[in-house]
Every structure is written in C-alpha cells, then in structure tokens.
Amino acid sequence: MAKTETSTSNDRFERGLALLQKIGGQERPAVLDSLADIAPDLGRMTVEFGYGDVLSRPGLTLRERQLATVAALAAMGNALPQLRFHIDGALNVGCTREEIVETLIHVSLYAGFPAALNGIGAAREVFESRTDLPAPAEPGPAPQGDRFERGNAKIAEVDGHAGEQVVAALRDIAPDLGTYIIEYAFGDVYSRPGLDLKTREMVTVAMCTALGTAAPQLGVHIHGLLNVGGTQTEVVEIITQMAGYAGFPAALNGITVARNIFAERSQH
C-alpha cells in the first residue's frame, strides 16, 4: 500500500513539475528552492496539487487557465510575486501581451482601478524583462457610436436582457450608477476588441469567485459565460482552479452559485 501511495505521489509530482516547467520556463522551478529551507513540503504540495492535480485537468486550455489566474491574482491584489510569475507564464503558453493587458483592463470592472493599475505595473515589469516578445501591436480603433447604446447592445449579448433593466433596478437610489455600468463596463470595456466575449466572461467568473464578495454578480456572469458559448464543464473548471489561488472556501461558495445557476437553466 505504501509503495502504491508513493508511486501515485511521484506521478502527481512529475506531472506537475512538467507543467510548471512549461508555464514557468525554468528547468528548476523557483518555488522548490525558495521553500527548501523552511517548508519543503509546501513546495512539493504546490507542484503536486496546484499543477499535478488542478492545472493538469482537461476542460480548459493553458491559455484560458493562465488568463483566469492573472485576472484573479490581480483582482485580489495581495500576491504580486505570483501575479508576475503568471503573467510571464501566460506569455510562455501563447498569450499575447495585448491579451494580458486587456485582461488587466477588464479587472478594473470587478476589483477597481487600483487593482488594474497595479496589475499593469506588474505586466510592465514582466514585458521589460523579456527580450523575445514581438513589438506591441498598434492600438485598435476606438469603439464607435453612443456609449450607452453600444453598452446596451453588448450587455444584451452577455446577459440576454437590455441594459435599461440595470438602470431601472437602480433608478430609486443610484440611477447614475446604472448608467455607468452600461456606459463604462459594457460600452467602453466589454466592447474593446482585445478579448472575445467568452474569454471576458471566463476571467470574470474567475475574479468574482476569487474575490468572494460578489455571489450575485458571479451568478450573472456564470449565466453570461454559458450565454456566449461556455459550457458547464468550463464553469466548474474555472471555479475549481480558484481553490489553489483564493482557497477552498471561495471555490466551494462559487460551486454553490454554479449549482443554482445550472439548476435554474435546466428548468427553463
């Protein structure tokens, strides 16, 4: 029995180590050496569980997993070294600098401008340290048309309802807040070309799960991800992945929201 357990543990470690090397771009991951003198078991468990168990699962591409992780870490705002590592890792698995920057701009909607600005600062450090990146792409054209109308159309794509409902729900107390949600969140940010709607909803589900303070909004964006082509499997994978970055309570609470959404949709 002991031999079987050791073999299973070794398999998990080797699988995790291979994936960590791919993401981190290093033969010897720094997490092992940095913890060797104080908590070597934590280093091993990071490799076995974080990479061997969770990130090795099917259901999401490595690009999707890295963008979800970058979004969650930036939103939480308490893990700058890990954010830099995963921005670098996102580049290593095929994400572009433009996709990373767009993900960090998207963070402003759910964690605020300080979190987005700090994330951009981390991205700048990583980009400047890399000599293998192509030159930045030329900025795309600014979205055209009325901001409210543009946002109204975009929120209908994601939520299936017109944006006026958001304004109506807040009319008695904060009508301007409703207008800002339509104009800025959906008219300005969601309408930008740097990420497709499915990826935007994926990183939003990751952020709302990791923050742990936005269960109603998490429900809205689980619906949104499913509305724009995501699957229940992808929703569960994103939330499960957050166990490694925001903890099991955040993931368990996220799964509770997802269960309710899946049940609601199955009845309609």
Image (cartoon, rainbow, N blue to C red):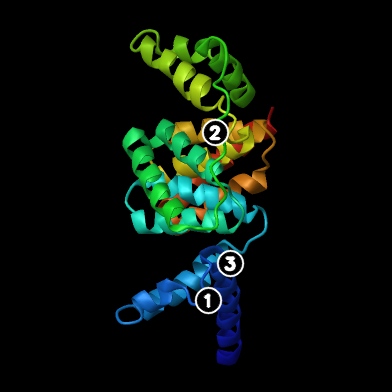
Q: Which residue carries the number 2 mark?
A: 221
Distance of mark 1 from mark 2, alpha carbons? 38 Å
- Type of residue at label 1? Glu
Earlier residue among tags 1 and 2 = 1
Q: Which residue carries the number 1 mark?
A: 27
Residue 92, picture quadrant: bottom right
Mark 3 and mark 2 in contact? Answer it, CB < 8 Å.
no
**Dot 2: within a 10 Å radius of its alpha carbon, few (fewer than 14), some, or many (20 or more) residues?**
many
Distance of mark 3 from mark 1, alpha carbons? 9 Å
Q: Which residue carries the number 3 mark?
A: 22
Earlier residue among tags 3 and 2 = 3
Identify whether 156 is placed above or below 90.
Answer: above
Residue 52, picture quadrant: bottom right
**Residue at the spot x=45%, y=40% of the render?**
104
**Residue at the spot x=54%, y=33% of the render?**
221
**Residue at the spot x=57%, y=61% of the render?**
55
Determine the secondary structure under disc 1.
loop
Comparing marks 3 and 2, which lies closer to the viewer?
A: 3
